[in-house]
Image (tube, rainbow, N blue to C red):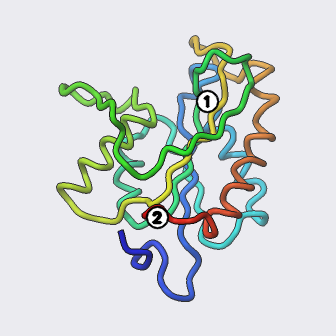
Amino acid sequence: MSGTGPADGPGTAPRVLVAGIGNVFLQDDGFGVETVRRLAAREPELPPGVELMDAGIRGVHLAYRLLEGFRTLVLVDTVSRDGPPGTLYTIDVGPEPPAARPAPGPLDTHAMDPATVLALLHDLHAGAGGTLPEEVYVIGCEPRATDEGMGLTPPVAGAVDAAADLVLDLVRRAPSVPRRG
């Protein structure tokens, strides 16, 4: 994939999209949305070219938005890896489509995890064109509860500022991260 184009032309900052994913009506599942809200309050700290998106449960909208030419994508979501609630993870997903793809069938736009969004993105790109992100990261938080209810549990709420700091560190270095060959 070329290093120039809509994602980053000469003299412009590479475009980065930070998308908060999750359902705010399912307790800790709202972690990504809350982290992006917190980042919006710190907007002066964001480097040029960084855009924030509260994707919530709108995974299809996110996939289409990504075709607009972002060099780097940072998804913020809950990630279950059997760690203590509130544990943060930084995962380098890479630009390739996920190996495990969702089974064919009706698309449930309200239950799209990052892997499903990325698979849809690659399918849309194959059919409609556009520019795929060259770098894809997930900043994830181990949830404590995802039952119906508003508000994050204490350990997850306590991880939001640290997650925002991780996102800021990542987007500040994103343009200088070596590109994959």
Residue occupying the point 65% across, 73% down: 48
Residue at position x 50%, y 56% in the image: 135
Q: Residue 14 at x, y = what percent?
A: 55, 72
Count of marks placed on residues: 2
Sequence-wise first label, 2 or 1:
1
Mark 2, other Cα within 10 Å: few <14 / some 14–19 / many ≥20: many
Q: Is residue 129 above or below residue 77?
A: below
Q: Which residue is mark 2?
A: 70
Query: For residue 35, what is the image quadrant?
Result: top right
65 versus 107 height, above or below: below
**The image quarter in which residue 143 lies:** top right
Name the secondary structure under disc 2: loop
Tag 2: residue type? Phe
Q: Which mark is residue 170?
A: none
Left or right: residue 115 versus residue 26 is: left
Mark 1 surroundings within 10 Å by alpha-carbon count, few (fewer than 14), some (14 through 19), many (20 or more): many
Question: Which SS class for mark 1?
Answer: helix
Give the x, y percent position of residue 131.
Answer: 35, 65
- Calculate the distance from the C-alpha at mark 2 to the C-alpha at mark 1: 24 Å
Question: Residue extending furthest front?
Answer: 181
Residue 50, image x and y in percent? Answer: 61, 64
Q: Considering only vertical position in the picture, is 56 above or below 173?
A: above
Name the residue at 70% across, 23% down.
151
Q: Quarter of the image for the C terminus: give it.
A: bottom left
Residue 76 is situated, as x and y percent measured from the top left of the image, at 59, 40
Q: Amino acid at mark 1?
A: Gly
Please give the residue where the numbered disc 1 appears in the rendered image. 30
177 relative position to 114: left or right = right
Residue nearest the viewer, comparing 121 with 180: 180
